[in-house]
Amino acid sequence: MGEVTAYVDSNKNCFHLVLAAILERNGIHPDYAWNQAGLYYEESENHWKMTPYFESVDNCLRGVKVISEKFSCNDRLLDRLDDLLTRGQNVVVPVDIYELPYSMYYREQHNPHSIEMLRLEDGSYHICDHFFQFIGTLSRSDLKKTLDAYNSHCLPDITFSYLQISENELKLPDIEDATTIIKKNCAIMEGVLLDGMESLGSGIYGFGVIVRLIKKLDEMLSLEESAAKDLMEEMYCDIKEVAYSRDNYSAFLKRMGLGQLTSPVEEAAQCWRAASNMLLRAKVAGNHEGMKPRIFKRLERVQEQERLVVEQMENFLSVKGK
Amino acid sequence: MRQCTPLDITPYINNRGITQANIDHHLGFISVGGCSFPLEEVPIETGLICEEIPFLFSRTDEGDNIELEGQTLSFAQVLAGQVHILGVSTNGNFFDRVQFFREGKLVRVSRLALTNFIEREPFFPQNRVALQFTHVNTRVGPKDTFKPILWHTSLDLEGEFSIDTICFEDNPSMHIFAITIESGGND
């Protein structure tokens, strides 16, 4: 393996950053892999789920598989990790930033995060943290600490992942695949699934989600600040992920030679991202009531832009269908 | 004849993005994570000349930059062909609308696009490096894992117009550290 550099992309979460870095290192442009820009929301008593994705990421790239392995015991995880690294397989491992000595949040703040494990050398792990642009080593005891912190503060089980790329089966999307993806994204936004698309549950699809989201945020921002804090953090991540999906959809369309379609998609991405950052700002700086109208105004712009996206895509599909 | 008018943005400053290690680094808030640029690397007193455009910095008790929240900047009427801005986006790469007025009438609408301060290359092609810092100050002290950049961008008004007001959108992820208005650039 040549020298590893951090993969910098403001439009991907830390887990996707690692996958993108590995794809790029294997000569596959990451733009091909992230093209889903739907919207789904469901809520149960104390929890909600909001996502722009409706299929696994590796569904978008024939010949690429994301393999995940789940562990309830970190010693077993480390043994398996060592085994994979020894065989030259890079692995994406979830950690808690609280126990990453190089992080600006070290011993300050708990938060789930993903790093790439590159190799094992002299008892230390060579890692690349693409998000924090850190390439260096992590001792076995530091890795164990951050995994234990992840168990205590993020999720009780740890699932690590790695990519399996089959060069013989690899096929990048062509214009017909891109057309199918555009149709699926429009279908999700209009809440009418196409044949072959799996239901995500009994929640709300597409434009209706934005109306529900405004109501949810109104409730959330009316809570006591301490009670709202964790909910706001989670909702911030969810809204940001929607923004990422729009930016990545735009990059995909450009890569497929459909750059003429991207303007409203980029505007939508900007509005989602601005709304998410406003929510984060409200969480960090307080003043929930003051931020409410600002966030809602931005989400109204989101609504307008999302409608423009679907309108533009449907025009494209109808012209293409002629 | 080319004329450059640096604007005094002092009345509109609402955010601290420049700090000193071991003095006020914990107060930096250019990003919600608490990042800021190192004071010793910003020519606050002398200003900065970038591509022959002079920029003035401001520093008050409130901070040193404008975090965009829909402000209206008013100033003495000036002829404008290009509006040069030093700024950054945080937690993403952002663009948004900017409106230019004269005596209450809309003269021009443009788009301000600013690359994230942590990016190594401009995300928006019209952005150029104004200053690249050796490190970033964080709430827990200086970190040199990335070298943040203050970006320079120019809004071309496509003609020359007298303006006395600039209106920004409500987008707190965008920060402006200096503005200079240029006219006569094509003479």
Image: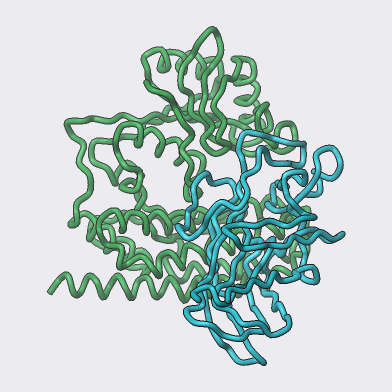
Chain colours: A green, B cyan
Q: Nearer the viewer, residue B120 or A159?
A: B120
**Residue A172 quadrant:** top left
**Residue at horizontal 71%, vertical 32%?**
A106
Number of marks drawn: 0
**Residue at horizontal 79%, vertical 47%?**
B19
**Left/right of residue A177 with respect to residue A163 in the rendered view:** left
Q: Position of residue B3 (x, y in %)?
A: 62, 74
Q: Nearer the viewer, residue A94 or A21?
A: A21
| Quarter of the image with the N terminus of chain B in it | bottom right
Q: Is residue A322 above or below residue A213?
A: below
Q: Position of residue A19 (x, y in %)?
A: 41, 36
Q: Is residue B111 above or below residue A199?
A: below
Q: Nearer the viewer, residue A22 or B57?
A: B57
**Left/right of residue A34 with respect to residue A300 in the rendered view:** left
**Residue A205 quadrant:** bottom left
Observer able to see residue B142: yes
Q: Position of residue B81 (x, y in %)?
A: 54, 77
